[in-house]
Amino acid sequence: MEILRKTANFVLGKRMVVFQKIRLSSTMSFQTSFAKKVSARQSEININLREFGSSSLLHCTKASDKEMAKSLQREIEDEMESLSKEKSYFDGWEMTKSGADVKITKAFPSETISVMFNVNNSLADNYDDIEKDEYDGPPMSSRPPFIVEIANPSGMKMAFECECSSNREPMDQIDDEMQDDEINAGYEISSVQVYRDERLPTNYVCQALDRPLHDNLMDILMERGIDNEFVDELVDFCTNYEQQLYIDFLVKMKSHLTEK
């Protein structure tokens, strides 16, 4: 019996050793396989990260920039060809410009008149669908709202906010029977305010202008030269100046796209 017990323990011990070797081998094999998978996954992730910032994407962006720059150059050349020749405007007025803001001023012994306007968002069609076939002229004109300020030496001022009317024909092209100031003044007064020194948001603005008051205020402005011919000149100037700013914008955009 003792011999059988020793033989059984010997066989069991050998099996345990064999089992431990198999388990260790299996564990090492699993670790090796897992390490390979992790390494492969890391390589895959690294490759994807490189592709996200790859030069091919940057190349596509630069190609789009170059194509846009070519289109801008063509647009600049077309606009330059259609730009009106340089000519003088508002004789006797002093003009100051700051980007899209323009101010013209004329001083008299008893008062100073200033007209201020901004050409941004001022383009309007010169014809509608019905008139399109018969109209012969520029497709759009710049017709910005403008403010006329009359300043007394004391510092008291009166400001008129005006809107260009929809009349598209200059006064010299309107029939004599249509020469009615009430219809063809070239602009309308939308509001008026009176203040000292400077316009403030807290100033009262009178907007509900009845016809008699509106007509009297129009007479005040027209006696000071803010009439139909003035508005025609203002629209002509604004159309030309807005186009100059547009060309300058195109040039700056092209410069930005082609800058290295």
Image (tube, rainbow, N blue to C red):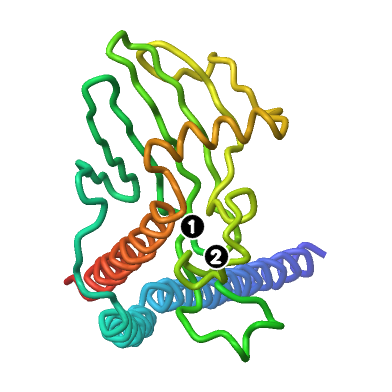
Residue 162 at what x, y percent from top left? 53, 41
Q: Nearer the viewer, residue 102 or 2?
A: 102
Can you tell which mark lies on residue 3?
none
Residue most extreme to the bottom: 133
Q: Quadrant of residue 112?
A: top left
The residue under the point 57% across, 60% down is: 179
Residue 224 seen anywhere in this rendered image of the structure: yes
The 10 Å Cα crowd at callout 2, few under 14, some 14 to 19, many 20 or more, is some
Q: Nearer the viewer, residue 199 or 79?
A: 199
The structure residue drawn at horizontal position 25% and vertical position 35%, both measured from the top left corner, is 106
**Which residue is the site of mark 1?**
143
Q: Amino acid at mark 2?
A: Ala
> 3 or 163, which is in the foreground?
163
Whether tag 1 and tag 2 are in contact, CB under 8 A, the answer is: yes
Q: Which residue is mark 2?
A: 124
Residue 49 location in percent, x, y? Answer: 42, 71
In the rendered image, the quadrant that contains the N terminus is bottom right
| Tag 1 secondary structure | loop
